[in-house]
Amino acid sequence: MRARIIKIAVVVAIALILLWRFWPHPIFKWLPDDIDSASKAVANVSISDIKNGKSRIDTYTMNEVNQDQLKEILGILDTSKYRRDWRNLVPWGLSSVHSGKKYDGRSVQIYIFFPVGDAEYGEYVAITYKGKDGIILYGKGIAGMRVYHPTNPETIDYLVGYLQANGVLQ
């Protein structure tokens, strides 16, 4: 009887861990609740590739993202749900993350700043999208780095297109 209870407990624990890992959530689940109080946001996309035997990196930046543009960027991020990564189980958070096998040379960085007292840029949340492999979140209210995987692999395409259309080529 005792062995059966232990087996059932192990099966339930495994099922809960799998549910935790594979159940997708919207991006807003992990962003601060006061996202509307952001004082500033900046974004950029880097696209690296090889053309005619030479490497090149194109970078498009948006150094003054207004509230409407931030809503559009967050709307693009919301075109996907995100699954947790196994590495998020460590209680102390991650200190570094590498690109996975789905990295395609594109990287999007979005920084959202929040005022603290008189400081306009007191705290921030950083969202880094690495190819189709996943996103990394860190900053305000997030313990260390956290990794999530998008359910919609085209979200990076939408982000890159938006930043190329609205950003400045450096």
Image (cartoon, helix red, strand yellow):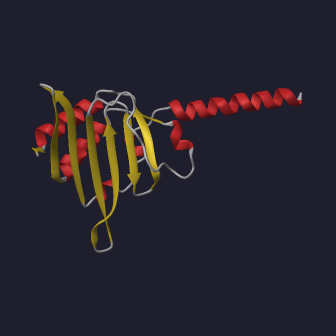
Q: Is residue 80 left or right of residue 96?
A: left
Q: Position of residue 97 (x, y in %)?
A: 42, 43
Q: Look at 33% across and 73% down and name the residue there.
A: 117
Which residue is situated farthest in the right direction here? 1
Q: Is residue 93 left or right of residue 61?
A: right
Q: In terms of image quadrants, where is residue 100?
A: top left
Q: Look at 28% across and 43% down and name the residue there.
A: 74
Residue 112 visible here? yes
The answer to which of 145 and 78 lies nearer the viewer is 145
Which residue is situated farthest in the bottom direction here? 118
Judge whether 145 appears above or below 155 on screen.
Answer: below
Residue 65 visible here? no
Q: Position of residue 5 (x, y in %)?
A: 82, 30
Q: Look at 85% across and 28% down and name the residue there.
A: 3
Judge whether 75 appears above or below 119 on screen.
Answer: above
Q: Position of residue 163 (x, y in %)?
A: 17, 40
The answer to which of 130 and 124 lies nearer the viewer is 130
Query: Total marks drawn?
Result: 0
Q: Position of residue 21 (x, y in %)?
A: 53, 33
Q: In terms of image quadrants, where is residue 131?
A: top left
Q: In the rendered image, which quarter contains the N terminus? A: top right
Which residue is situated farthest in the front direction here? 53
Q: In terms of image quadrants, where is residue 132?
A: top left
